[in-house]
Image: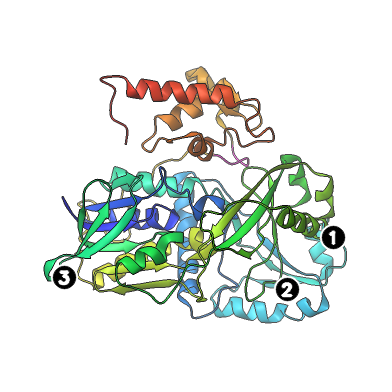
Amino acid sequence: MSWDVAIIGGGVVGTAIARELARYQLRCVLLEADGDVGTGTTKANTAILHTGFDATPGTLESRLVARGAALLREYAARAGIAVEPTGALLVAWTEEQAGRLDAIAAKSKANGYTRIRSVPVSEVYQREPHLGPDAAGGLWVPDEWVIDPWSVPLAYATEAVRAGVDLRLGTRVTGVSDLPGGDGFELTAGPKPLRCRFAVNAAGLASDVVDRMFGGGGFTIRPRKGELIVYDKLARTLVSSVILPVPTARTKGVVVAPTVFGNVLLGPTAEDVTDRADRSTSAAGLSALLADGRRILPGLAAEEVTATYAGLRAATEHSDYQLGLYGRYVRVAGIRSTGLTASLGIAEHVAGLLGEAGLPLKPRPGFGEGESACAAPPLMPYLGEAGPRPYQDAARIAADPAYGEIACHCERVTRGEIRDALASDLPPAGLDGLRRRTRAMNGRCQAFYCRAAVSAQFEQAQFEQAKPGAPDGD
C-alpha cells in the first residue's frame, strides 16, 4: 500500500504531526522504532508548559513555542490532561545575575510575552518562603505551568489512530530510496518496503541518521544528558511555583519544580554524551544536584528521594530548531527540551509546509479549518493530584467496584484504572508503559509492594487478549 505521508518518530512531536494530518483526507502512517509512543526524550522531560519567554527572539523556536503553548493549554483542558497554573519564579542569586534580569525581561517582551515582571527580594521570599538565603532579585512569569507529560503524546496518538492513521510500533526505518520520477520515497521499515508520497522526519535522537538517509546533512545530534531527582510527595509543601535559575547560553540550568503528580522535581544536569542510549545516572551528577537543591531549597535535604532518572535531549550544534522542507521531505530536528510545549505549533507548521509542497490538505467531511481531527479529543484518565481521582469518587465506585480496589497504594491507583489502560486504544506493551498511563508503580516504594499484583493483572490481560477468538489489539 502507498501512503500519502509517512511520519517517522512517535514522540510528542511525531504524534502531534500525525494528529494534525489526520484532520485531512490523507492516508498517513506513523512509524515508531520502540514498542510504544513517547518513550524517548518525551518521557523524561521536566514537564513544564513553557511560555517561551527566554527563547531567542526571531527564531522558529520562539514562534512555535508561543503558538504551541496556546494550543496545548486549550487541548489539555478539553482532553482532561492534568495541568497546574503554578507560575514560575526566576531567581537571581548574585548581583551579577540580578544585573541580567532586565535583559531577560526585555527578551521576553521581544518574544511577545509581556506578563513577565520584576519582583523585589521581599516578594521573592513572600512567594517562596522556603528558598535559600541571599536571593538578589527575581522575575515572576505567571504563565509557566506544569503539565502531565505522559498523557499528551498518548492523547495525540489516540486521536490520530481513531481518525485513521496507521500506527506501526516496533518499526525502525533503516533505509530510504527515491521513487521513479521523484514521486515520493520507498522506506525500508519492517518486513516489507513502504511507499509514501511525502515523508516527515521527527525521529528525535535518531533524526540526523534518518536525515542522511534522505540525502540531508548540515546538523548532527549531540545528545545532552540530563539527570533528575524526584522527591516524595511530603516535599510538595516546600514549593508552590517553578523555581528557575538565570539561564546560560548552553542550558536553562537546574530547576526546582512541583509536578502535577504531587512530587518535587530537581534537575536537570547538562552533560554532552556520545552514547544515544546512555540514560544512566551517576554519583557525580546526583551529588551535584543534591548540592544545588540544598542551596536553592534547603528543606529538600531532609526529604526522601522517590526516584532518580536521566533523559537525553536531542541537541545539535545549532541554536534553533532544524525544521525545513526539502522537496517532498520535511525535517523536524533539534527540538530539545521545548518539544512538549511546541508540539502542536510544530505540527501546524509542518502541515503548512506539506501544503506548500503540493500535498492536498482537504479537510475530512465534518472537519473545517482549525477543528481537531475528531469531534473532540479523547478524554484521558486524569493523573494529577489537584483534581479527583477514581478512588475518591463514591458514585464511580458504586457503579464499578474495581475503582475502589487499590492496586498501587503509594499512588492510589485502582484495578479499574489499570483495567481501562490495558483495554484502551493504545494499550501498553509492558509495565513501563503501564506506569505512564496510570502512575502505578511510580510511588515511594518504586513497585516493591505492588509489582506482583500489577504484573498479575497485566499478564492476565495479555493472556485474555491472546485467546483464540479474542479481538485484535491496536
Q: As displayed, is residue 161 above or below residue 65?
A: above
Which residues are the magenta region? 383-387
For the point 31% across and 51% down, the residue is 30
The residue sitting at the right extreme is 133
Q: Amino acid at mark 2?
A: Ser
Mark 3: few/some/many CA within 10 Å (<14, 14-19, 20+): few
Residue receiving disc 1? 132
Mark 2: few/some/many CA within 10 Å (<14, 14-19, 20+): some
Residue in front for this viewpoint, 290 or 176 = 176
* Real-space CA distance between mark 2 and mark 1, rounded to the nearest whole angstrom: 19 Å
Indicate which disc residue 182 carries.
3
Q: Amino acid at mark 1?
A: Gly
* Real-space CA distance between mark 2 and mark 3, rounded to the nearest whole angstrom: 55 Å
Could you tell which of marks 2 and 3 lies nearer the N-terminus?
Answer: 2
Left or right of 23? Residue 377 is right
Q: As displayed, is residue 9 above or below residue 119?
A: above
